[in-house]
Image: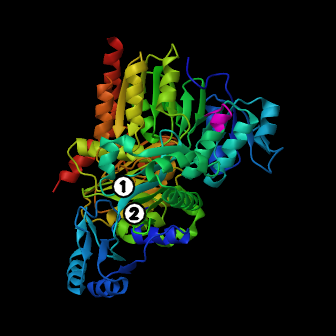
C-alpha cells in the first residue's frame, strides 16, 4: 500500500519537451511509472519517446484519462501550469519547478484548494511509492518497497535519509518532498493524516529544517492524533540567524523557527529526533518494536 | 532581499504613504548639514539591515550642531549585530502622541497574506507578540482578490477608534497593499505608525522585504540591493548563479540542495570540524558551476580541506564529475578534496573521476569524518 500514488496512477508531464521534463519523463518511465501523455503548447501531435504530446492539459486528459500532473515548466509559467492542471480536473498536481514567486503561490494554493485538487510543491523533488510509481526527480534505485512513510521539506536530504533506511533494510510505503518554499501545497499535517490512514504504513520519518513553524504545528498534531511512531531530523543547526540558506524557507528570524524550538516541540510530542541522518533507521526500529 | 529604511521610505512616498522628510548622510559633516536642513531637534537613525537599532544605541535625538556632530560621528561606523553603519537617516523629531503598528506579510501556515494592526506599536512589538498576542489584530486574505476594505475595517476601527484616524489608516493600508502586491514584497511594515499633533498619522519607519523569487519581475528594484549585505564571495557567487553564504570555519563545502547542504554543515560540526561556507550548486547541473564553486571557495585562505557532497536527483553526478575535472585542469587546488557522489548517473560520474585518478565515496558520514581529519592536519 501507499498514499497518493500507486500502480494505477496515470501521469501526464507538463513541459515534457524541455531539458528537465524530457530527461525525467524518461527516468519515470524507466522506473515503472505510467506516463500516459505530455503537454507542451505548440508541440501537440508530436511524440516524445512514443509518449503523445498535447497542446493543453485538457486535451491530454481527454485523450489519456490522466489523473496526476507533474510540472517541469520554467518558473514564470508555473502558476499558469498549476491552474491549467486544476481546471482540467486532475486529482494530484506535483510542481517540481523552483523560483516561483510567493504571491503567485498563495493565489495558486487557494485556487487548487477551491477546485478540490491536491498540490505537492513547488520547489520539490516530487513523490514516490517504491516499486509502484514515481512522480518526480528522485533516483528510484535508492528506494525499497516497504512500510515507512517519509515527509520532507528538502529534496536531496530526503534521498540521504531514504538511502539510510534502504541500507538498513527498511523499505518505504511513500516518500514525499513537500518543497522548501514559504508557501507549498500539502504540508506535514496533511500528509501525516494521510499516512495514519494507510494500514500499510507502520512508521513515519519527518524531515524538517530551520525557518517557519510547520514542524512545531506538526508536533502538536502528532501528539494528538498519530498512532504510529514518528522519528524526525531537523537540518540547519549550524545556520547563522538571519541568513538565507538557499531555500526561501530556511531563514531564522526573530527567535522563531530555530532548530532548538523545533527539536524541543517534537521531543515533547514523543518524537525521537536524530542527530545524524544515519541514526534514523535505528531510532525507528526501536520504536517499532515497542 | 532586505532594503534599508531610507529605501523603504522612498517606496512609501512613491505610493503616497505619508512619512516626514528625511535626508541620508554618510559623514559627520553631512549629518550636521542635514540636521540644519530638517531643523532641531532632529533624530539620527543608523541604516543597517537588522532590527533592534534603537536598543543598540543607533537612533539618537539631537538638539544642536554639537550634538549632531557628536552623535553622527559615533553612529557612523558603529557595529550593530555585526553590521557596520555606513549611512544614517536624518529626520525632524516629531512630537509623538501615540505609536501604532501596521504590517503586511505572508502567513505560511495559513497560506495567505496577513494584515496585522496594533494600537501598541513601537520598539517592544515583538515582546507584545509573545506576551499578549491578542493585542495584535489580524486579518488574513488572498491576493487573488483585491483588498477587501470591508473585511479590514473592523480591526482598523478597533485599533484606531476615531473616524478621522480610521480613514487615514484605511488609506495607508490600501496603499501598503498595492506596494506589497505590485513589488512582490514578502513584508511591509510601519512601526511606529505615529499619531502626531493635528491628528495626523505618519510612518516614522519603513521596513520592506522583497521576495527573491519575485525580483526577476522587477529589474527596477535591483538597484536597491545593498552590496554590504553580502561578502565579496557571496556577490561573486550570485553573479554565477550559486547560492552561497560565508561562514567562519575552515572546511569548504559544495553540496546540491539547501537541506542537504545545511545537514552536511551540521555533520561537519557534529564531528568536530567547522564549515567555511554554505554552498548549494542548485538543481539542473552544469559542469561550469562546479568550477565556479571551487574558485569561490578557494578565494578564502582559511579553507584547509574541501568536501563535495552530491546526492544526484535532478543534478547528474556525471556533470559534477566533469566539472571537478574541468576545475583540476584549469585551476590549482592546493588543499585536499573529499568527494562523495551518489544518485542519478553516479556510476558514470565515479568512472569519469577514476579515469583521472580521483577517488570518491558513497557514504556521507565516512566522507565527513575524513574531511574533518584532513582539515585538522597541520
Alpha carbons under labels 1 and 2: distance apart:
8 Å
The one nearer the camera, B364 or B197, is B197
* Residue B186 visible in the shown view: yes
Q: Crowding near pointer 1: few (<14 within 10 Å), some, many (20+)?
A: many
Task: Judge whether A175 appears above or below A183 on screen.
Answer: above
Q: Position of residue B5 (x, y in %)?
A: 40, 68
Which residue has dot 2 on it? Answer: B194
Q: Which residue is drawn at 31% across and 40% down?
A: A259
Is A128 displayed left or right of B280 in the figure? right
x%, y% of residue B315?
A: 51, 47
Which element type, helix, strand or loop, lies under badge 2? strand
In reply to whether residue A115 is colored magenta, the answer given is yes
The magenta segment: A112-118
Residue B121: image tag: 1
Determine the residue positioned at 35% across, 64% down. Answer: B49
Q: In which quarter of the image is the N terminus of chain B?
A: bottom left
Amino acid at each position: 500500500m501507499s498514499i497518493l500514488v500507486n500502480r494505477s496512477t496515470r501521469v501526464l508531464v507538463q513541459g515534457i519537451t524541455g531539458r528537465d521534463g524530457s530527461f525525467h519523463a524518461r527516468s519515470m518511465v524507466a522506473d515503472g511509472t505510467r506516463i500516459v501523455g505530455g503537454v507542451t503548447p505548440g508541440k501537440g501531435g508530436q511524440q516524445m519517446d512514443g509518449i503523445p504530446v498535447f497542446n493543453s492539459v485538457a486535451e491530454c486528459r481527454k485523450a489519456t484519462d490522466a489523473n496526476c500532473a507533474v510540472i517541469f515548466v520554467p518558473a514564470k509559467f508555473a502558476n499558469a501550469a498549476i491552474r491549467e492542471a486544476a481546471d482540467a480536473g486532475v486529482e494530484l498536481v506535483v510542481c517540481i519547478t523552483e523560483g516561483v514567486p510567493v504571491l503567485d503561490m498563495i493565489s495558486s494554493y487557494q485556487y487548487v484548494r477551491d477546485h478540490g485538487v491536491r498540490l505537492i510543491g513547488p520547489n520539490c523533488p516530487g513523490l514516490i511509492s517504491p516499486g509502484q510509481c514515481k512522480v518526480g526527480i528522485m533516483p528510484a534505485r535508492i528506494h525499497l518497497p516497504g512500510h515507512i512513510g517519509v515527509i520532507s521539506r528538502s529534496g536531496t536530504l530526503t534521498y540521504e535519509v531514504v538511502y539510510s533506511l534502504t541500507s538498513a533494510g527498511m523499505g518505504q510505503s511513500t516518500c514525499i518532498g513537500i518543497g522548501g518554499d514559504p508557501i507549498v501545497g500539502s504540508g506535514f499535517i496533511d500528509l501525516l493524516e494521510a499516512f495514519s490512514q494507510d494500514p500499510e504504513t507502520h512508521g513515519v520519518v519527518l524531515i524538517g529544517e530551520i525557518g517557519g513553524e510547520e514542524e512545531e504545528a506538526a508536533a502538536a498534531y502528532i501528539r494528538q492524533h498519530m498512532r504510529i511512531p514518528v522519528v524526525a531530523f531537523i537540518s540547519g543547526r549550524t545556520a547563522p540567524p538571519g541568513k538565507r540558506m538557499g531555500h526561501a524557507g530556511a531563514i531564522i528570524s526573530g527567535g522563531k523557527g530555530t532548530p532548538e524550538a523545533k527539536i524541543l516541540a517534537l521531543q515533547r510530542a514523543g518524537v525521537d529526533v536524530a542527530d545524524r541522518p544515519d541514526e534514523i533507521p535505528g531510532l525507528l526500529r526501536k520504536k517499532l518494536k515497542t | 532581499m532586505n532594503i534599508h529604511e531610507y529605501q523603504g521610505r522612498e517606496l512609501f512616498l512613491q505610493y503616497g504613504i505619508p512619512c516626514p522628510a528625511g535626508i541620508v548622510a554618510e559623514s559627520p559633516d553631512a549629518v550636521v548639514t542635514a540636521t540644519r536642513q530638517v531643523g532641531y531637534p532632529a533624530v539620527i537613525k543608523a541604516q543597517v539591515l537588522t532590527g533592534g537599532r534603537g536598543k543598540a544605541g543607533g537612533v539618537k535625538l539631537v538638539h544642536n550642531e554639537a550634538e549632531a556632530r557628536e552623535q553622527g560621528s559615533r553612529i557612523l561606523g558603529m557595529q550593530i549585530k555585526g553590521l557596520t553603519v555606513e549611512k544614517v537617516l536624518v529626520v525632524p523629531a516629531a512630537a509623538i502622541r501615540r505609536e501604532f503598528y501596521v504590517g503586511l506579510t505572508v502567513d505560511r501556515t495559513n497560506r495567505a497574506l496577513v494584515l496585522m494592526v496594533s494600537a501598541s506599536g513601537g520598539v517592544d512589538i515583538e515582546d507584545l507578540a509573545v506576551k499578549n498576542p491578542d493585542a495584535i489584530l489580524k486579518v488574513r486574505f488572498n491576493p487573488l482578490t483585491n483588498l477587501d476594505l470591508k473585511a479590514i475595517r473592523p480591526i482598523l476601527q478597533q485599533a484606531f477608534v476615531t473616524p478621522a484616524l480610521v480613514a487615514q489608516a484605511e488609506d495607508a493600508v490600501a496603499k501598503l497593499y498595492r506596494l506589497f502586491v505590485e513589488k512582490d514584497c514578502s513584508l511591509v511594515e510601519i512601526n511606529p505608525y505615529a499619531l502626531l499633533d493635528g491628528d495626523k498619522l505618519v510612518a516614522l519607519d519603513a521596513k520592506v522585504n522583497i521576495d527573491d523569487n519575485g525580483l526577476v519581475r522587477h529589474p527596477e528594484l535591483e538597484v536597491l540591493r545593498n552590496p554590504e549585505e553580502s561578502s565579496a564571495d557571496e556577490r561573486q557567487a550570485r553573479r554565477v548563479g550559486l547560492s552561497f553564504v560565508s561562514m567562519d570555519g575552515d572546511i569548504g563545502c559544495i553540496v546540491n540542495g539547501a537541506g542537504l547542504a545545511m545537514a552536511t554543515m551540521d555533520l561537519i560540526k557534529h564531528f568536530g570540524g567547522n564549515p567555511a561556507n554554505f554552498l548549494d550548486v542548485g538543481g539542473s547541473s552544469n559542469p561550469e558551476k562546479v568550477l565556479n564553486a571551487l574558485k569561490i571557495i578557494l578565494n578564502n585562505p582559511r579553507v584547509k580541506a574541501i568536501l563535495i557532497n552530491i546526492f544526484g536527483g535532478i543534478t547528474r553526478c556525471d556533470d559534477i564529475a566533469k566539472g571537478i575535472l574541468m576545475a583540476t585542469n584549469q585551476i590549482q587546488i592546493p588543499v585536499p578534496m573529499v568527494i562523495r557522489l551518489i544518485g542519478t548517473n553516479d556510476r558514470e560520474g565515479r568512472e569519469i573521476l577514476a579515469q583521472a585518478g580521483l577517488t570518491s565515496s558513497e557514504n556521507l558520514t565516512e566522507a565527513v569524518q575524513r574531511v574533518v581529519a584532513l582539515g585538522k592536519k597541520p
